[in-house]
Amino acid sequence: MKALFISFYQAFYDEVMEVLEKNNVTGFTFWEEVRGRGSRGGEPHLGSHAWPTLNSALITFVPDGVVDTLLADLKKVDETAPKQGLRAFVLEAEERTA
């Protein structure tokens, strides 16, 4: 199982939801407003007067076999406006009951 942390420009919300739905990802935790600046020269999203836009973020836990297709679909979304930003980070995850 993998954890995917996805940070993205708020305007990409619908596209990110479509990618999750296409890949049958139904469970996630979502943060609507997060601030940040990427490391690849994109525009900052700080919610300030100078940089008024914001990002959103989500985390989801998926089977290993879903990851490559999910990342490829997210990359296509990012490529539509690369200066706005969409990043996905994959982490090992282990499910345990409390």
Image (tube, rainbow, N blue to C red):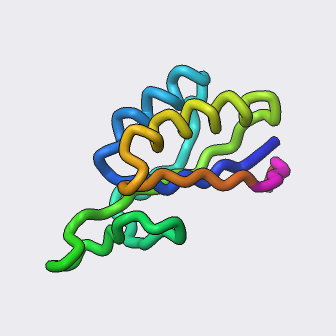
Instruction: Left or right? Give the position of 6 relative to 77.
Output: right
Going by the picture, which residue comes out furthest to the front? 41
Say which quadrant the N terminus sits in: top right
Magenta region, main secondary structure: loop
Q: Residue at x 43, y 55 (%)?
A: 85
Q: Position of residue 72 (x, y in %)?
A: 62, 33
Going by the picture, which residue comes out furthest to the bottom? 49
Q: Position of residue 65 (x, y in %)?
A: 80, 29
Q: Classify 45 as above or below 85.
A: below
Q: Nearer the viewer, residue 76 or 46?
A: 76
Say which quadrant the C terminus sits in: bottom right
Instruction: Left or right? Give the position of 92 relative to 59.
Output: right
Q: Is residue 95 magenta?
A: yes
Q: Residue at x 46, y 43 (%)?
A: 78
Q: Nearer the viewer, residue 92 or 43?
A: 43
Dividing the picture into quadrants, the one containing residue 13 is top left
Q: Position of residue 96 (x, y in %)?
A: 84, 51
**Residues drawn in magenta:** 91-96
Instruction: Left or right? Give the position of 90 relative to 85.
Output: right
Residue 96 in view of the camera: no
Q: Position of residue 76 (x, y in %)?
A: 51, 34
